[in-house]
Image (cartoon, grey):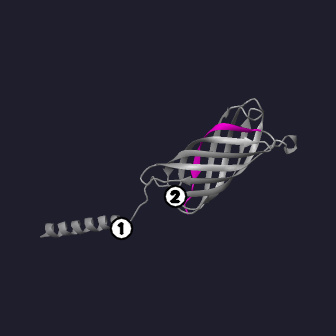
Amino acid sequence: MKSLISLIVLAALTAGLSGQGAKRRFPSSSDLNPLRGYVNITELGGGPGLAVTSVPYSKYYFGLTTVNGYQINQYLIAGAGLGFHLYNEGWLLPLYASGRFTYPIHGSKISPYANGDAGILISFGNSGDDNRLFVNPVLGARYTISPVMAADLGIGIFTQKLPGAKRDSFLNFRSGIVFIPKR
C-alpha cells in the first residue's frame, strides 16, 4: 500500500512540474530583445576606393562609428551616428542619420538586415571647405550572441560627394556589435 501511495505522489509531482513548464514560454536564446527602446550599434568599417582614386580622400578609408538610437519594433531601428574616418589624405568626422531593417528568423541565430546611413563628413581643415555629403547602403547578417547582444557583418557602397566635384565611392565592409539592453 505504501508503494502505491508513493507511486501516486511521484506521478502527481511529475505531472505538476511538467505542467508548470508547459505554461511558461521561455524566449529562445537565439532571439535578440524585440522590445522598444534604446539601441547602440558600434562598428568598424572601411574599404578600397572604386574607379578614380587619384583625388584626395578617394584611395581608401578606415573608421569607427557608433549609432545611438531607438528600436521601434523587432524589425526597425532609427538613430543618429557619429564616428571617425581615416583616409589616405587625412581624417573626417561623419555625422549622420541611420535606419536599419532586420528580418529576425526565430529559432536561428542569424538574421539578415538592410541598413542605410546618410549625412555629412566634417573636415576640420581649410575652414570646412572639404565637408562632404555621403550615403552608405549596406546589406548584411546579424549573429545573436545573447538576448541583449549581437554581432553584425555587412557589405555596401559608401559614396561621398564634395560640393562642386565628382563623387567618390568605396567598397565598404563593416563589422560590429549591436546592443539592445533589457527593459
Against 110, residue 22 (above or below) is: below
Main SS of residues in magenta:
strand
Rendering coords of residue 180 (x, y %):
57, 56
Dividing the picture into quadrants, the one containing residue 77 is bottom right
User: In percent of the image, x 73 and y 35: which residue is there?
Assistant: 87
Query: What's the residue type where badge 1 is placed?
Result: Lys
Task: Indicate which disc residue 98 carries.
Answer: none
Of pointers 2 and 1, the one earlier in the residue sequence: 1
> On the rendered structure, is 86 left or right of 33?
right
Which residue in the protein does label 1 denote? Answer: 23
> On the rendered structure, is 124 left or right of 59?
right
Rendering coords of residue 15 (x, y %):
26, 67
Which residue in the protein does label 2 denote? Answer: 33
Labelled pair 2, 1 in contact (Cβ < 8 Å): no
Q: Kindly report the distance in space between the C-alpha atoms of the residues bearing marks 2 and 1.
A: 21 Å
Query: How many numbered marks, from 0 up?
Result: 2
The residues colored magenta run 166-183
Q: Quadrant of the N terminus?
A: bottom left
Residue 52 belongs to the span the image colors magenta: no
